Image (tube, rainbow, N blue to C red):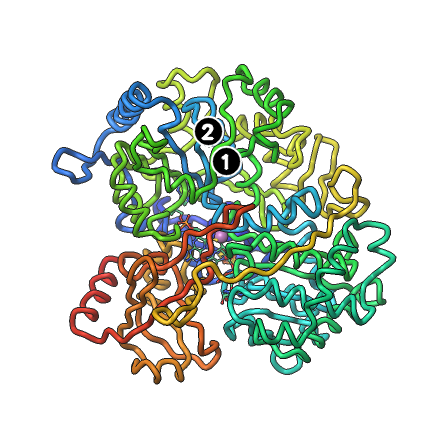
Amino acid sequence: MTDTHCPYCSLQCGMRLTVPAQTSDRASSLEVTPRDFPTNAGGLCAKGWTSAQVLDVPDRLTTPLLRGPDGALHPASWEDALSAITGGLRDIWAAHGRSAVGVFGGGGLTNEKAYTLGKFARVALRTPFIDYNGRFCMSSAAAAGNRAFGLDRGLPFPLTDLAGADAILLLGSNVAETMPPALRHLSGARERGGLLVVDPRRTATAALTDDEAGLHLQPLPGTDLQLLLGLTHVVFAEGLADTDYLRRRVDGVGAVRREVAQWWPERVERETGVPADLLRRAAHLLAAAAPGRGGAGAYVLTGRGAEQHAHGTDTVTAAIGLALALGLPGVPGSGYGCLTGQGNGQGGREHGQKADQLPGYRSIGDPAARAHVAQVWGVDPELLPGPGVPAVELFKKVGRPAAEGGIRALFVHGANPVVSAPDAGALEARLRRLDLLVVADLVPSETAQLADVVLPITQWAEESGTMTSLEGRILARHKAIEPPPGVRDELWVWRELAARLAAPAPFSDDPHEVLAELARASAGGIADYGGVTMERATREALYWPCPSAEHPGTPRVFLDRFATPDGRARMLPVSAAPVADDLRPEAPLYLVTGRVLEHYQSGAQTRRVPQLARAQRQATVTMHPVTADRLGIEEGTPVRLTSQRAVAVATAVFSTGIRPDVVFMPFHFAGRQRANLLTNPTTDPISGMPEFKVCAVDVASADTPAARLALLSEEARA
Ligand SMILES: Nc1nc2c(c(=O)[nH]1)N[C@H]1C(S)=C(S)[C@@H](COP(=O)(O)OP(=O)(O)OC[C@H]3O[C@@H](n4cnc5c(=O)[nH]c(N)nc54)[C@H](O)[C@@H]3O)O[C@H]1N2
Ligand SMILES: Nc1nc2c(c(=O)[nH]1)N[C@H]1C(S)=C(S)[C@@H](COP(=O)(O)OP(=O)(O)OC[C@H]3O[C@@H](n4cnc5c(=O)[nH]c(N)nc54)[C@H](O)[C@@H]3O)O[C@H]1N2
Ligand code: SF4
Ligand SMILES: [Mo]
């Protein structure tokens, strides 16, 4: 019996794994039961319940694969696979230098792996070019949090705090499908009529506002910024702001007050489509719940719907501005937070796999930070490369000639960008032009299928480590079963490669040792793990910063001061911008992308679980029946979607809960059913976040035998 956590999302639901006594120790017999852990309180979603099945999927990678002269992948020994990598690297280094090698990591890696991957890139490969899929996730919220509060911890308070609030504003988050066990924490606000959901679709989450439980605001995609400026306008104009709090704790109020003066509700209605009186009601509900006005508490929370835009950082800045105007951040029972997505989305962005970071959320450009980390690693600070570039820019370098600054070798650990990156067709073509693509994965993901070297690695139940959940709590993941023979821990892979590449620092493959080193490297940094051990993470509710063995950790940051030099939060004026790839006559509909309950991300894992695959086998495109009627599309038939970049296919599904000018497609499917063939790689100038959530498309019926066959063959592949 082993107590651990779900391998998927940032809620990190507590679960118990049991190996029934009379059967073998392999995974198919492993039983999953939920535990009573604060985030899930005994609940699990369908993905959590079925998570153990991924350990034993029929096409689990159990041996390294090498691409042969015939162009196909063939089983190989670890010795041959590692030699192919080091040989390939030496050739590329000799011809093009260290910067021709790149690394792409993931927010699902444990803290120990994320830390080691960052160290591996800087010390063993000595390249600046590392970034990770968290750039696609909450980077705009992180950037906005850093500039407003001086620190980015997704939720600066425990998730269970939400239960006491009178009102919660959820912007672009569909928790009912993306974190179902978390719904219990919204029930207090619902009972008091204060659940406010902003989503262009009537999602399962929006439906929770029915029966006077709250309000659903259904704006045009990409207009959250205008909506937030409108809400803040009402707060200031109608005397609802917490002026005492603003005086004590916030700078920059005057400029924001002037900026929002021009966003009166009727103007916001014209730009967003949200009725002015609904906007006023929402502002009043939030204000009545604010502690400064005698309410029990209020929260403003953002999800990917508000963040994954070319102006996502400014949108989150406006969300924080609204929260500050109401006097919420840093006050017990109230606040602003971002609902981080991946299992270790929080820890994954703290320990060095981000282009500009060293462990502990330190900046790689800061000489003091470089000196501290270099000393822990036992290397000269001069040896550490400078900052790299964010994911989309990194991918633009991939496969280009080295003379043009191109990347010729890429390591992918914990991501499947062929499905999940914007403009994925273009990325796929670039990956094919690499001299060396190394992919470490559990399964032959779409990205692994393009690799020159595929490394089979252990999964969550086969390894130990720590994860940091959406609330900044550090959790222990415990090994429950032995991995299949032939599979290795990634820490071992990096240790072996570093040794073979004669790296100037030692690498450990013992997660306890790595955590102890991470603790030293992060000590004194913003995300200080100085006092974190696996034992404490197992026993205690341990939140960072936790600088020493005696320190109890910090469940709530900002209570006394914000993390800016003077302790005050910054309010910043921001202005609205149109969607980058906006509507035009040839592309008259907005495509919005996101998630469904049963599938996780690129689907590499969940499409392999029969029960989840059955729930949704193919990509669907949800549209209003009025839109479908106008386009001559029948429900359940193939549809062709065309954007400026490519064409994708999906099966039409009707819903009256979606705006007639919007269609929705999940991004969990492969081949021609990839939503990301269509999406726009334009990024937010501050965070590097691509505009996943909205682009202009043309939608047409494609009910031909060929299209039906295309959908079926993709289904067979899935
Ligand atoms: N089932 C499932 N759960 C998951 C995941 C998964 O893949 N599947 N992934 C995990 C991860 S990594 C993440 S990041 C989280 C994401 O969790 P969420 O943020 O809840 O998920 P999304 O479905 O991407 O987006 C949320 C909503 O944004 C809406 N939206 C689209 N455009 C806009 C807009 O312009 N404005 C507003 N206000 N809303 C908009 C969409 O209609 C959608 O309902 O989920 C985590 N949990
Ligand atoms: N259109 C559109 N695109 C999106 C989004 C969207 O809303 N719309 N959301 C974006 C967001 S928020 C995210 S987080 C990304 C996620 O997108 P991806 O990074 O593609 O996410 P996953 O499918 O989780 O890919 C993880 C891969 O790593 C493997 N894996 C799991 N654990 C480990 C491990 O410990 N080590 C290694 N080496 N491999 C492991 C899995 O089998 C899988 O193949 O997608 C982004 N893409
Ligand atoms: S909500 Fe997230 S952590 Fe919980 S069971 Fe589902 S996927 Fe796992
Ligand atoms: Mo994410």
Secondary element at image label 2? loop
State the count of labels: 2
Image coordinates of residue 27 in percent, x first then y, are 37, 48
Q: Mark 1 sits on what residue?
A: 355
Q: Is residue 540 above or below residue 665?
A: above
Image coordinates of residue 425 in percent, x first then y, are 30, 52
Near mark 1 (Cα within 10 A), the count class, few <14, some 14-19 or many ≥20, is many
Residue found at x 84% / y 62%: 292
Which quarter of the figure is the C terminus placed in? bottom left
Secondary element at image label 1? loop
Image coordinates of residue 593 in percent, x first then y, are 43, 63
Asked if residue 3 shows in the view, the reply is no
Q: Is residue 656 above or below residue 599?
A: below
Contact? badges 1 and 2 (CB < 8 Å): yes
Image coordinates of residue 710 in percent, x first then y, are 20, 65
Q: Mark 2 sits on what residue?
A: 128
Kindly indicate the quadrant of the structure image that contains residue 290: bottom right
Residue found at x 68% / y 58%: 160
Kind of residue indicated by mark 1: Ala
**506 sits left or right of 301 in the view:** left
Q: Nearer the viewer, residue 500 or 280?
A: 280
Q: Which mark is residue 2?
A: none
Q: Earlier in the sequence, mark 1 or mark 2?
A: 2
Is the CB–ligand 2 distance for label 1 below 8 Å?
Answer: no
Structural distance between the alpha carbons of marks 1 and 2: 7 Å
Kind of residue indicated by mark 2: Pro
Is the CB–ligand 2 distance for label 2 below 8 Å?
Answer: no
Q: Nearer the viewer, residue 120 or 226?
A: 226
